[in-house]
Image (cartoon, rainbow, N blue to C red):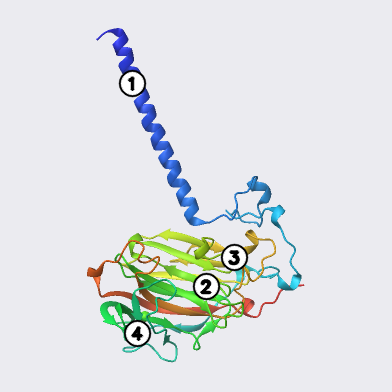
Amino acid sequence: MTNQRKLLVVACILSLTLLTSCQEESKDQVETTTQVETVTQVESAPQEKVKYRVGSAISDAYVNPDTIVEVAEVDIRAKGFVYDYDTLTYDLVWSDEFDYEGAPDETKWSYDVGGHGWGNNELQYYTNGDNATVENGNLVIEARKEEQEGKEYTSSRLVTKGKGDWLYGKIEVRAKLPSGVGTWPAIWMLPTDWVYGSWPASGEIDIMEHVGYRQNTIHASIHTKSYYHTIGTQKTATKYIETASEDFHVYTVEWLPDKIMAYIDDELYFTFEPVKYKPNPTTAEWPFDQKMHLLLNIAVGGNWGGANGVDESIYPVEMLVDYVRVYQSKEITNITKQE
Ligand SMILES: [Ca+2]
């Protein structure tokens, strides 16, 4: 090999190495960006992030001062509440330990019944409790492949509406989730009285959602008139856990007068604090000053759960719930705004 050739070979090896490392670097960057986007959706890309930062905690949410609108004091929400978070004490106010056998306690649970798709083109018919039972210390919700009322699947959706609802508090649900493409279990909350209008104006809090085609990725979300999934503005965080369907995990929401947080096994992974998006939030950003009740269900298919199809071969599938515990804090329950 001539010297010239040797040089050429060395140059080729060098440029190949560089190219490879460049590609690896850009791949890393893409992955990082994707993760950030999944965690928090920023309303608009600010020019100078530091300048627009609002609140004491470092956050991905910023308020652009050019967009600040004046709001009458009476219409401002989620602002002006004074409490010491570190000294809050919680008392158990409602629970079901599922430490009995048979049908779920009818003093605590009712059923949403029907097969109209539930706003999401879901495939199941929700029965009047036929797919829910309590055994071995757990509530068992079972989704089955069986025809009923023109639908190919049955399941149950338990609700505490009319039997348990709360304003502010900490809701803990220890559960083991079904797996399989097309399953969509959820632990969530809806308003009891819809005083700010129909969905999403009166709000929705999703304590836990899991879609089978993204096994072990857990979602916590809120929906309001300004922030909801149909227009892509809902506030969401995701957390990957390794054993969502093999082990029980504790899914928690902590609902305070000015923010909502979600945890898995006591680890915080979602905070929604509306003043970080708007200095003067209204009910469009914070309808969460009215009572809400709890819902537990497995949906089959649907716009999100069925986005990658539905595996028909996996049924029946179950969600097990060891307990539901609702705590409230006397420092928070009767809190009013400071003038
Ligand atoms: Ca139990």
| Figure check: 223 above or below 65 | below
**Depth check, front residue: 55 or 277:** 277
Q: For mark 3, what is the residue?
A: 226
Q: CA distance from mark 3 to mark 4?
A: 33 Å
- The residue at the point 65 percent across, 80 percent down is 334
Quick one: label 3 or label 4, which is nearer the N terminus? 4
User: Which part of the image, by quadrant, shows the N terminus?
Assistant: top left
Mark 1, residues whose alpha carbon is within 10 Å: few (<14), some, or many (≥20)? few
| Residue at image mark 4 | 127
Determine the secondary structure under disc 2: strand
Q: Does label 1 or label 4 sit earlier along the sequence?
A: 1
Quadrant where the C terminus lies? bottom right
Q: Mark 2 or mark 3, which has the lower sequence index?
A: 2
What's the CA distance linking mark 3 and mark 1?
A: 55 Å
Q: Which residue does the image show at 75% across and 70% down from the upper left?
A: 73
Residue pictured at 42% horizontal, 41% vertical: 28
The residue at which mark 1 appears reads as 12
Report how far apart the C-alphas of labels 2 and 4 lie in the structure: 23 Å
The residue wearing badge 2 is 204
Identify which amino acid the numbered label 2 is placed on: Glu
Relative side of 231 to 242, left or right? right
Q: Look at discs 1 and 4 and give the one toward the viewer.
A: 4
| Amino acid type indicated by mark 4 | Thr
Is label 1 within 8 A of ligand 1 (CB to nearest ligand atom)?
Answer: no
Q: Nearer the viewer, mark 3 or mark 1?
A: 3
Residue 188: % across, % down = 46, 74
